[in-house]
Amino acid sequence: MTTTVDGVAIDLDRVQTALDGSRWLWTCDIDDAGQALMLRLDAFGEGVQPLDYVVRWHGALTPQPEPTTAAMYRQVLEAA
């Protein structure tokens, strides 16, 4: 699922890393205001927070890089 915060699209299906280095994962829940609920994944966990709170207090989010799989390599080589 993709959502937007302040006009920026955020892919909720991936772990997100905030500007301060904290890592967040969508809990697959939405609060009463329609905000995605995010769970902090590191040792300093704050529990579950709404997405707009995470962006406001922890900074912009970027998706955590995913490792390249053998299937991805195969797909590229077969397309060449």
Image (spheres, helix red, strand yellow):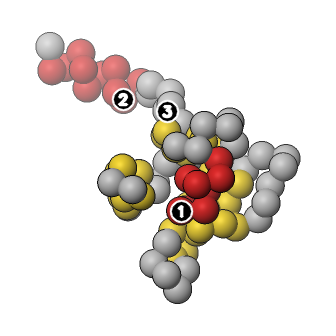
**Residue marked by disc 3:** 66
Other-residue count near label 2 (Cα within 10 Å), few / some / many at <14 / 14–19 / ≥20:
few
Tell me the kind of residue under disc 1.
Asp
Please identify the residue farthest to the right as the structure is shown.
Answer: 43
Q: x%, y% of residue 75?
A: 25, 26
Q: CA distance from mark 2 to mark 1?
A: 35 Å
Q: x%, y% of residue 78?
A: 19, 20
* Residue 52's disc number: 1
Question: Is any part of residue 54 visible from this angle?
Answer: yes
Please state, as top left, top right, bottom left or bottom right, where the N terminus lies in the image.
Answer: bottom left
Tell me the kind of residue under disc 2.
Ala
* Residue 71's disc number: 2
Q: x%, y% of residue 13?
A: 46, 54
Seen in the picture, residue 77 relative to 72 is either above or below; the reply is: above
Q: Quadrant of residue 7?
A: bottom left
Label 1 vs 3, first from the N-terminus: 1
Label 1: state its secondary structure.
helix
Label 2 vs 1, first from the N-terminus: 1
Seen in the picture, residue 12 relative to 73 is either above or below; the reply is: below
Residue name at image x 14 percent, y 13 percent: 80
Q: CA distance from mark 1 to mark 3?
A: 24 Å
